[in-house]
């Protein structure tokens, strides 16, 4: 098959969707398919790409509504058809909006992915997607929760929606070879990690408030928040909250780390406090490392975390419940060890090869 992937932009291959796309491209190339990647907009990463498994082309579409952007999209359609591309698969928001009208009347099998609970929707975007719900575009969702939400919001026919879970690229690198200067030493304290870009949807403030309740029970674990810090007022508000609760010494904001998985074995509990998730790569990596998990009961999280078996789920925003879940794990070594063993067994369900094979089957079946 000739397969073309298209995405709004690519800043790295470490993010959730970006990593899944990279693994998908690697897998399709290894299976003998001809693959090209198109990006709407260039970034420093795509301008200076190291070795990449397929050719990468920039379409220079800064805005899909500008005259120049529309002309380039029409040229892209002509190129895809002229190159006899069999499958076109798009990721991210501008691509999801562009492909339905762009590929009308073509014989190219076209897919777009949905990987969150609609945090990018606006009334205008939803109306647009609903208008084109009868197009031949097929949707691939990364969890049952995302598929159900997409069906309800976009009104797309159920038979055109498929669920393919994220694939787990098992971490087999020697942790000693990773740069882990930011991480704590194992065993000195209970160490808790939250891997997430620090923005409001991740509700980091809930973890801070829960930590203040945990202190009242006599525990002082160390909390590490690993991810990009927004430059707006949200990060400042978190620092103010830490001061108010006298927790500045207990919280460590590391900023972005290239490969946090190399240090996960140094932690005792993995936390995810988001208000919205599709299917969390962070949770998959916690479980792969054998970390017991405390996660908000949103999106695809309940499909990943077996409540009471590999971790605890709580209602997003319920700080008391979050604190109670963490306290149960802090206070009980046996539960932590049991959850850790269960996690390593459970994560084998989400295999990289299965994810790639499932996409290939959908492409061939369409």
Image (spheres, rainbow, N blue to C red):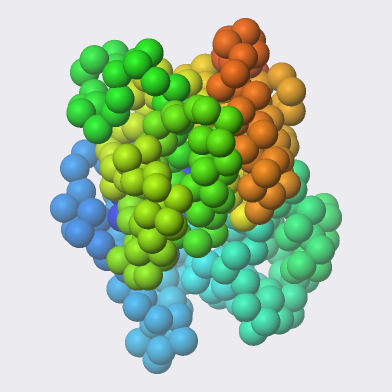
- Where does residue 219 sit, x and y in percent of width and height? 50, 27
Question: Quick one: which residue is furthest to the left in this view?
Answer: 48
Residue at the image point whose x is 40% and y is 47% from the top:
246
Q: Is residue 148 above or below residue 261?
A: below
On the rendered structure, is 250 left or right of 317?
left
Q: From where the camera sits, is residue 77 visible?
A: yes
Give the side of residue 43 with respect to residue 271, left or right: left
Q: Nearer the viewer, residue 84 or 66?
A: 66
- Where on the picture, by quarter, is residue 29? top left
Q: Residue at x 24, y 26 (%)?
A: 180
Task: Please report the residue visible at 52 percent of the width from the left and 28 percent of the height from the top.
Answer: 218
Name above or below for residue 328 compared with residue 72: above
- Label count reads 0
Q: Position of residue 210 (x, y in %)?
A: 57, 43
Residue 36: tell me if it is visible.
Answer: no
Residue closer to the observer: 300 or 194: 194
**In the figure, is residue 111 to the left or right of 321?**
left
Q: Residue at x 35, y 64 (%)?
A: 236
Question: x%, y% of residue 18?
Answer: 42, 47
Query: Residue 338 sits in which quadrant?
Result: top right
Of residue 135 and residue 217, the one placed in the foreground of this image is 217
Question: Horizontal placement of 133 versus 279: left or right?
Answer: right
Q: Nearer the viewer, residue 196 or 285?
A: 196
Q: Position of residue 167 (x, y in %)?
A: 54, 32
């Amino acid at each position: 098959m000739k397969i073309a992937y298209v995405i709004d932009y690519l800043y790295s291959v470490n993010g959730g969707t970006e990593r899944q796309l990279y693994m998908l491209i690697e897998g399709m190339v290894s299976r003998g398919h001809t693959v090209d990647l198109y990006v709407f907009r260039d970034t420093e990463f795509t301008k200076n790409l190291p070795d990449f498994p397929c050719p990468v082309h920039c379409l220079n579409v800064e805005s899909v509504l500008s005259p120049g952007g529309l002309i380039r999209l029409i040229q892209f359609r002509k190129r895809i058809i002229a190159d006899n591309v069999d499958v076109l698969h798009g990721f991210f928001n501008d691509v999801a909006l562009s492909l339905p009208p762009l590929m009308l009347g073509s014989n190219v099998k076209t897919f777009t992915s949905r990987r969150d609970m609609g945090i990018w929707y606006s009334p205008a975007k939803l109306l647009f997607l609903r208008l084109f719900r009868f197009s031949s575009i097929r949707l691939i969702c990364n969890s049952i929760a995302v598929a159900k939400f997409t069906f309800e919001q976009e009104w797309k026919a159920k038979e055109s929606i498929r669920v393919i879970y994220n694939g787990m690229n098992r971490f087999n690198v020697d942790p000693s070879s990773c740069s882990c200067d930011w991480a704590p030493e194992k065993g000195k304290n209970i160490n808790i990690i939250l891997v997430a870009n620090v923005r409001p949807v991740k509700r980091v403030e809930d973890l801070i408030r829960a930590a203040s309740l945990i202190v009242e029970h006599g525990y002082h674990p160390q909390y590490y928040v690993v991810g990009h810090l927004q430059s707006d007022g949200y990060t400042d508000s978190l620092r103010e909250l830490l001061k108010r609760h006298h927790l500045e010494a207990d919280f460590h904001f590391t900023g972005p780390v290239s490969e946090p998985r190399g240090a996960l074995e140094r932690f005792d509990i993995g936390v995810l406090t988001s208000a919205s998730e599709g299917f969390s790569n962070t949770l998959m990596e916690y479980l792969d490392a054998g970390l017991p998990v405390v996660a908000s009961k949103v999106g695809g999280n309940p499909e990943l975390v077996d409540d009471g078996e590999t971790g605890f789920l709580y209602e997003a925003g319920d700080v008391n419940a979050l604190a109670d879940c963490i306290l149960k794990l802090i206070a009980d070594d046996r539960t932590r060890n049991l959850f850790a063993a269960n996690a390593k067994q459970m994560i084998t369900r989400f295999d990289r090869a299965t994810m790639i094979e499932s996409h290939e089957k959908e492409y061939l079946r369409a």
